[in-house]
Image (tube, rainbow, N blue to C red):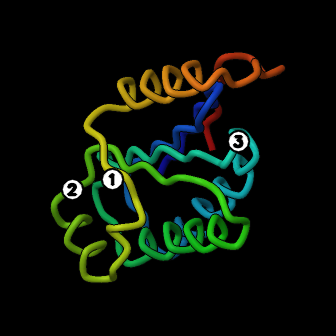
Amino acid sequence: MYIETIRHLHCTVVRAGGELDHAGRVRFSACINAVWDWSVGPVLVFDLADLDFYDSSVIGVLAMAMQRMEEQGSGRIILVRPSDHLLSVLRLTDLLSRVELRESVEETVAELMLDNSARGSPSSPHPGFSAHRH
């Protein structure tokens, strides 16, 4: 399993590929905790399209992030190109209504930048983006 994080000004993109099972869940959760404060909210954009296999661990990680966002009263989870299977599991677990769905990471990042520019958000001292592999 690989996990790649890309820090943008208004969101953090988390890409995962390979097999996400119980062992990978620990790494995936740790990665999310490590990038939690990279964006205001936070706004986490998950690209899980390259996952070859995943079990209920992916739902556990997303549910953990949702719960943390609820506790702090802010944050967004955006799923890019989720598989039909993941969508059905999210629907069955009643988590689908708590995520946003998009078709492209690039378009999502651009949309978030435009939304924040239109609101006149202050500029951040952080660089526009940086990438990390976990």
| Camera-side mark, 1 or 3 | 3
Amino acid residing under circle 1: Leu
Residue drawn at (26%, 45%) of the image? 81
Q: Which residue is mark 2?
A: 83
Occupied quadrant, residue 88: bottom left
Q: CA distance from mark 1 to mark 3?
A: 27 Å
Amino acid residing under circle 3: Val
Residue 23 lies, with reference to residue 133, above or below; the image says: below
Q: CA distance from mark 1 to mark 2?
A: 9 Å
Image location (x, y in percent) of residue 72:
73, 66
Q: Are marks 2 and 3 in contact (CB under 8 Å)?
A: no
Horizontal relation, residue 117 to residue 109: left or right: right
Horizontal relation, residue 47 to residue 129: left or right: left
Occupied quadrant, residue 108: top left
Image location (x, y in percent) of residue 8:
61, 27
Q: Which residue is mark 3?
A: 40
Q: Are marks 1 and 2 in contact (CB under 8 Å)?
A: yes
Residue drawn at (35%, 25%) of the image? 107
Which one is in front, 24 or 6? 6
Using the image, tell me which numbered label, if any, was put on residue 51: 1
Work out whether mark 1 precedes mark 2 in sequence or the reverse, and give the earlier one: 1
Amino acid residing under circle 2: Ser
Residue 99 lies, with reference to residue 110, above or below; the image says: below
Work out whether mark 2 precedes mark 3 in sequence or the reverse, and give the earlier one: 3
Residue drawn at (21%, 56%) of the image? 83
Horizontal relation, residue 134 to residue 18: left or right: right
Secondary structure under badge 2? loop
